[in-house]
Amino acid sequence: MTLICVASPKGGVGKTMVAAHLAHEMRRAGAPNVVVIDLDPQNALRLHYGVPMSLRFGVVNCIEAGLPWDDAAIPSTSDVVVYPFGALTLPLQAEFDQAVRAQPGLIANEVLARANEPETIVIVDTPPGYSAAFSSLLPVADIVVTVMTPEASCISLIPDIKNGACYGVSQHEPASFVHRVIVNRFDPMNRISAMAMPQISRHFGNMILGTICRDEHVGEAFASQKLVQSYAPYCRATADLELVGSRLVQIIENLIERRGRL
Ligand SMILES: Nc1ncnc2c1ncn2[C@@H]1O[C@H](COP(=O)(O)OP(=O)(O)OP(=O)(O)O)[C@@H](O)[C@H]1O
Ligand SMILES: [Mg+2]
């Protein structure tokens, strides 16, 4: 029913962390079916959900072997269904990208099949920058959440994020998805963070879904293969994720209501 892509033109900003934790927040907010799909060959999303490192099977292996994606689904402790990317050697990653470029339905049909289930929220973690997998989902995504950090390298990307050019959105056609921005690893004690925030707020205005502070509990939770909400329920990052999650729920409810009126 709702397809959300978590993306960024920049690597290492916290996309995987955001995708994993927002999925948990959607489930906590009462969404009956929440699915989180990893489309990044780094295959790291599963680790937030305690999937053992040794378990390397995922959707890409289903595509390779002609198996249904359900074979890759892992039910998690927090009741979110996790689809790991799986393991691919580097040369095969390039082949995979080419195959998806030639046949966008390879990914999009499978993701949509899950997103079209009633009362289902699908959150997709995407690789940094351009990828054939993310491009194939853009025309069908309901919401794109761009993650950025309050650093000089991200600030320079503001115009391209704002108009969607970083994702190849044409400037002549309005984007078909709702676009929101999360500012991650905000640190009020850091000068660049403090200097960047007013600029980010000025440029993005109400496109900003929220801010998640830099919090060591996030890294510790990841190292323990737990979600930060269960590793440190009272930490700052958990509070920030809860707030961002509740705002995302509001957007989803508005979208569903609007669809109902059409
Ligand atoms: N709010 C935060 N506070 C502290 N550390 C964080 C925070 N968010 C993410 N991190 C850490 O930053 C690192 C990068 O996060 P993550 O892997 O989610 O980024 P990414 O955008 O998915 O990276 P990639 O582009 O490589 O896929 C991880 O070690 C993660 O634990
Ligand atoms: Mg990632």
Image (tube, grey):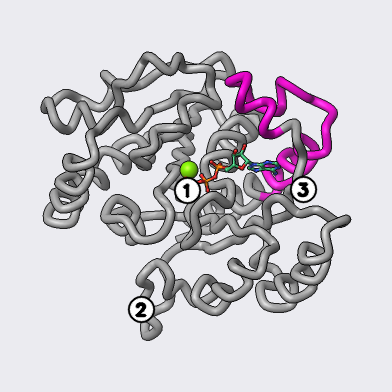
- The residue sitting at 44% across, 39% down in the picture is 122
Give the residue type that dot 1 points to.
Ile
Q: Is residue 238 magenta?
A: yes
**Secondary structure under the numbered disc 1 in the rendered image:** strand
Instruction: Examine the rendered structure and indicate whether residue 193 appears above or below residue 55.
Output: below
Residue behind mark 2: 170
Asked if the residues shown at circle 1 and circle 2 are in contact, with their CB atoms under 8 angstroms apart, the answer is no
Give the residue type that dot 2 points to.
Ser
Residue 199: x, y in percent? 74, 76
Residue behind mark 1: 4
Q: CA distance from mark 1 to mark 2?
A: 20 Å
Q: Is mark 3 within 8 Å of ligand 1?
A: yes
Q: CA distance from mark 3 to mark 2?
A: 32 Å
Answer with mark 3 or mark 2, whichever residue precedes in sequence: 2
Residue 209: x, y in percent? 67, 57
Residues shaded magenta: 218-247
- Camera-side residue: 1 or 171? 171
Left or right position of 47 against 65:
right
Residue 243: x, y in percent? 76, 44
Choose top left, top right, bottom left or bottom right for residue 216.
Answer: top right
Residue 183: x, y in percent? 68, 57
Left or right position of 72 against 180:
left
Residue behind mark 3: 213
